Image (cartoon, rainbow, N blue to C red):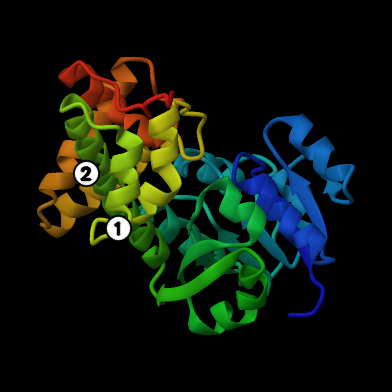
Amino acid sequence: MATAQLGFIGLGLMGKPMARRFLGAGHRVAVANRSRPAVDALAAEGAVPCGSPAEVARQAEVVVLCLPDAIQVDQVVFGPDGLAESMRPGSVLIDCTSNDPACAIRVAEALAKRGVEMLDAPVSGAPEGAAQGALAIMVGGPRKTFGRCKPLLDLLGRKVVLVGEAPGSGCVAKLANQILVGITFLAVSEALVFGAKAGLDPAALVDVLGAGLARCGTLEVKAPKILSGDFTPGGRVTMHVKDLRYALDQARDRQVPLPGTSLVAQMFNAQLAAGEGALDHISIVRVLERMAGVEARAHKRP
């Protein structure tokens, strides 16, 4: 795709570095956000500041969303000064929100009546991956629309895959991702708390586990947070709770048993009750630490 007129709505932990990727590639990007400081920060870097989704839509042939939840997507698309009444026929909405598949279907059907195409394209890879253009992007929508927009998505992701042409397919893939991530987080946390309770240095345990079959992205990317006790968020507990809620809803409707996911969801709920919803989701280890009466922190070397 040649240099395009883009819109970007939702400039949070993920959205801001994603929008910067488009700016860095030379695209004209109109931006909007619920709070103004993020808009002003990107405007200082060359983005076009806008006060509403409708204002973004009037300036863009492709609009990208990266919002917290289905409620915000509905507001941006269907609310006052929303996208549904403002996007031009032939334009495209790419929704990178970790969204409810039912919401993605609802939005796609409404926009199709106006001649607007849509891809639901949730992402995985944390803010660092967004800044580096190294995200995994799971895309649902028409193959032709995917082909048209893939050069843009390639600016954001190292792996961009069309997982299905039905609306909501990308959202389902993201829920599968969150199932695997959540269960892996719990497994890594159990292993490190188990070792710590036995007197092992969790840092040494991470080192050796990462060299064998137990190696995984959680050990590489998230274990350092456990070892240091620094749970500054990349992905928040609250967001993972939301995703697993959608996964369990889908599983109920499709009659798919998800026993591990159900357990992880309850562990995250315990964190919400403890006031830990804003922490990074690997802080699920705290629940186990409290239960075991030990912290899985790296031992201080003499």
The residue that appears at 87% across and 47% down in the rendered structure is 45
- The first of marks 1 and 2 along the sequence is 1
Determine the secondary structure under disc 2: helix
Circle 2: residue type: Ala
Q: Where the C terminus falls, by quadrant?
A: top left
Disc 2: CA contacts within 10 A as few (<14), some (14-19) or many (>=20): some
x then y, percent, for residue 171: 39, 58
Circle 1: residue type: Ala
- Determine which of the numbered discs, if any, sits on residue 176 in the image: 1
x then y, percent, for residue 112: 54, 69
x then y, percent, for residue 164: 38, 75
Q: In this view, does 48 lie above or below 121?
A: above
The residue that appears at 38% across and 54% down in the rendered structure is 217
Quadrant of residue 283 within the rendered picture: top left
Quadrant of residue 145 within the rendered picture: bottom right
Q: Is residue 84 visible?
A: no
The residue that appears at 55% across and 84% down in the rendered structure is 144
Instruction: Give the labeled residue for mark 2.
Output: 187
